Image (tube, rainbow, N blue to C red):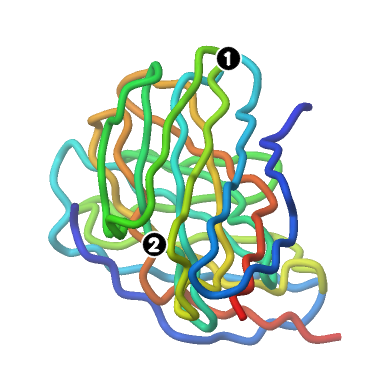
Amino acid sequence: DAKTTQPPSMDCAEGRAANLPCNHSTISGNEYVYWYRQIHSQGPQYIIHGLKNNETNEMASLIITEDRKSSTLILPHATLRDTAVYYCIVMGDNAGNMLTFGGGTRLMVKP
Amino acid sequence: AAGVIQSPRHLIKEKRETATLKCYPIPRHDTVYWYQQGPGQDPQFLISFYEKMQSDKGSIPDRFSAQQFSDYHSELNMSSLELGDSALYFCASSLRDRPTDTQYFGPGTRLTVL
């Protein structure tokens, strides 16, 4: 699976949009981009995933560049409860693949 | 909606003892994954099962074993516990449905080895 690069930390003001970038320049055509987050010591929480089109659900939006080498997770109106470590993970389409967590971005939402 | 259930939530053991962690997947999910997260570290994959057969194996010590039962719940057995085994252990489940396989995590078991 392709390696990802994320900034180690970011701050965001409460109520503003949080934009979390991820680079995955070696992504293959059949690999998906997944986002999970982990709120302090809780189980990782699935947020969203996509292949090449932009995706939106009740939690967030995922914007994937046309060349698929990077993506951005957008939390439209960040709240204090969104403070967490956010992981961008690239995974192939072989169902059953394990998740490889690496680094992630520690997002701090401030009042 | 029903989530992944893990028990116990907290476990304290002495060195060289054994421990058994249990995982009950989301109903109708057929795949179970185990992850270990040491203090200050990212979760690391240990092992997974699909339809009661071992599917993939990660950095799981030989002292650990796991299985998935006919009702799809899974147990992680840990023997000869060492101080370094102190960690959070997460179980995740998924419904294997190509091309993607979204995993949903339980709350974890915090194991402390004294």
Quarter of the picture holding the C terminus of chain B: bottom right
Answer few, some or many: residues within 10 Å of disc 1's Cα (few below 14, many 20 plus, some between 14 and 19).
Answer: few
Question: Residue B12 placed where, x, y %?
Answer: 69, 68
Task: Give amino acid for label 1.
Answer: Asp
Quarter location, residue B5: top right
Of label 2 and label 1, which has the lower sequence position?
2
- Single out the mark in the foreground, 2 or 1: 1
Q: Is residue B19 left or right of residue A41?
A: left
Say which residue label 1 marks.
B71
Label 1 lies in what chain? Answer: B
Looking at the image, which residue is at 49% across and 80% down?
B83
A101 relative to A108, above or below: above
**Considering depth in this image, is A27 or A41 the residue closer to the camera?**
A41
Q: SS of the residue at dot 2?
A: strand
Question: Residue B112 placed where, x, y %?
Answer: 63, 73
Task: Give amino acid for label 2.
Answer: Gln
**Considering depth in this image, is A111 or A38 the residue closer to the camera?**
A38
Answer few, some or many: residues within 10 Å of disc 2's Cα (few below 14, many 20 plus, some between 14 and 19).
Answer: many
Question: Residue B14 placed where, x, y %?
Answer: 61, 73
Query: How many numbered marks appear?
Result: 2
Q: SS of the residue at dot 1?
A: loop
Looking at the image, which residue is at 60% across and 29% down?
B25
Q: Is residue B92 left or right of residue A79?
A: left
Say which residue label 2 marks.
B44
User: Disc number at residue B86?
Assistant: none
Looking at the image, which residue is at 25% across and 45% down?
B57
A34 relative to B71, above or below: below
The reply to whether label 2 and label 1 mark residues of one chain is yes
Q: Is residue A72 left or right of residue A79?
A: left
Label 2 lies in what chain? Answer: B
Question: Residue A106 placed where, x, y %?
Answer: 56, 80
B112 relative to B92, above or below: below
